[in-house]
Amino acid sequence: MIESQPVKSSVLSFDNTEIAFSHMSNGELKKAFWLFKVININFLVKIGPPLTNFALNIGLPIEGIIRKTIFNHFCGGESIKDCEATINQLSNYQVGTILDYSVEGEHNEKAFDETCQEIIATIGRATKDKKVPFSVFKVTGIARFDLLDKIQRGETLTSNENDEWLRVRSRVDMICHAAYQAGIPVMIDAEESWIQDTIDNLTIEMMQKYNRIDPIVYNTYQIYRHDRLAFLKKNFAEAESSNYYLGAKLVRGAYMEKERKRAAEMGYESPIQPNKSATDRDYDEAVKFCVEHLNRVAFVAGTHNEASCMKLVKLMEEHGIEAQNSKVYFSQLLGMSDNLSFNLSHEKFNVVKYVPYGPVKAVLPYLFRRAQENTAIAGQMGRELGLILKEKQRRGI
């Protein structure tokens, strides 16, 4: 079999809007333009969540509006079956799907068990289908947040809490075992720093168990934390000495404002980098470290940063790594940074989109957080708008 050759980075352009939006009809492009115009207004993003929740709580019929706008753009549907059209559309452009069951805020054992089974169902859907190359889950989707916090603080658990923790561990193991049997890598998302040690310990335990032959379990490293680059290298050394593969998803992060606020209120050192340039530096260094250790590492570069994507392309070129090497993936969110996803896939790189799904009301916290995160990223929404406008002008619509 002839392996694909690395693309020349000079061929790749993230400004090519014809490729970036080739999957969108004129109507879809116009709708995306107005949606991003609204999201670009910080004031509306801040007041939107409480107003929407209030309207839903008093029974105003706004669910249909949400479904036709923000939900349709950023989510695949309410069920795995609903996501099939998105899975197939992305696949038509050589972009894979990560089915992300994005229900948040549950607090009872029945809901945790149901979520566990739903995550296993996403693994089942991915089995033997190249269109869905990964699965993903959040530990707080199958465990009580306060329990994870208490464990990280090192406090003694009650008898009931010990039983609860055993059930959490069992759910995590069931998911990772299902992924192992199916041969589908599963990524465990990162969360707040005050529960992350608990999640890390559980994830590393799963790697030790299931990553002996192939990288199945992936931990997530939020590089906006100043300690994560060192932690990644420490995990690699442990994997090497214990003879298992390190699976890594590299992201900048999702809880920056909350982290800084809590650290200030509670009087401890913030885990967050001093500035964006420090985050960018460590992110690119983490990517470089992974590229240089592919004998023991498989990784997903989860980023909407154009410079980081181009740096990874050039690193692969320099190291003679073929574009479709199974240990290197690029990843973005559905409905965002299509100029990255579709231009990379056009040049034969491995690309996956996170496709959130779940009942509209249950997915709203996820959607609000994404909107707030991305308005907080300097220039992100403006860049999205500019690219859509450029494509509208190119098409003459």
Image: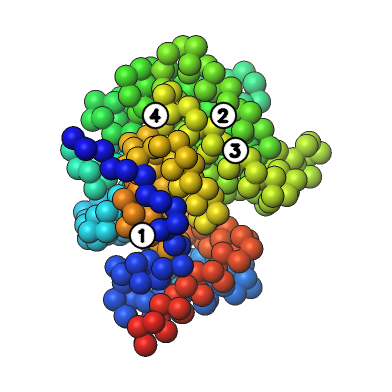
- Mark 4 neighbour class, 10 Å CA radius: few under 14, some 14 to 19, many 20 or more: many
- Pair 2/4: label in front: 2
Upstream in the sequence, badge 3 or badge 1? 3
**Label 1, on which residue?**
342
Q: Identify which residue, 290 or 371, lies in the foreground.
A: 290
**Label 4, on which residue?**
217
Q: Residue at x 57, y 46 (%)?
A: 252
Upstream in the sequence, badge 4 or badge 3? 4
**Label 3, on which residue?**
285
Real-space CA distance between mark 2 and mark 4, rounded to the nearest whole angstrom: 15 Å
Q: Residue at x 79, y 45 (%)?
A: 264
User: Residue 286, image x and y in percent?
Assistant: 56, 36
Real-space CA distance between mark 1 and mark 2, rounded to the nearest whole angstrom: 29 Å
Q: Quadrant of residue 117?
A: top left
Q: Residue furthest right?
A: 267
In what element is the residue under mark 3? Answer: helix
- Mark 3 neighbour class, 10 Å CA radius: few under 14, some 14 to 19, many 20 or more: few
Upstream in the sequence, badge 1 or badge 2? 2
Name the amino acid type tagged 1.
Phe
Real-space CA distance between mark 4 and mark 1, rounded to the nearest whole angstrom: 26 Å
Q: Identify which residue, 310 or 297, lies in the foreground.
A: 310
In what element is the residue under mark 2? Answer: helix
Name the amino acid type tagged 3.
Glu
Real-space CA distance between mark 3 and mark 1, rounded to the nearest whole angstrom: 25 Å
User: Residue 42, image x and y in percent?
Assistant: 62, 71
Upstream in the sequence, badge 4 or badge 1? 4
Real-space CA distance between mark 3 and mark 2, rounded to the nearest whole angstrom: 11 Å
- Pair 1/2: label in front: 1
Q: Residue furthest bottom?
A: 396
Name the image quarter holding the N terminus: top left
**Label 2, on which residue?**
232
Q: Is residue 32 above or below residue 263?
A: below
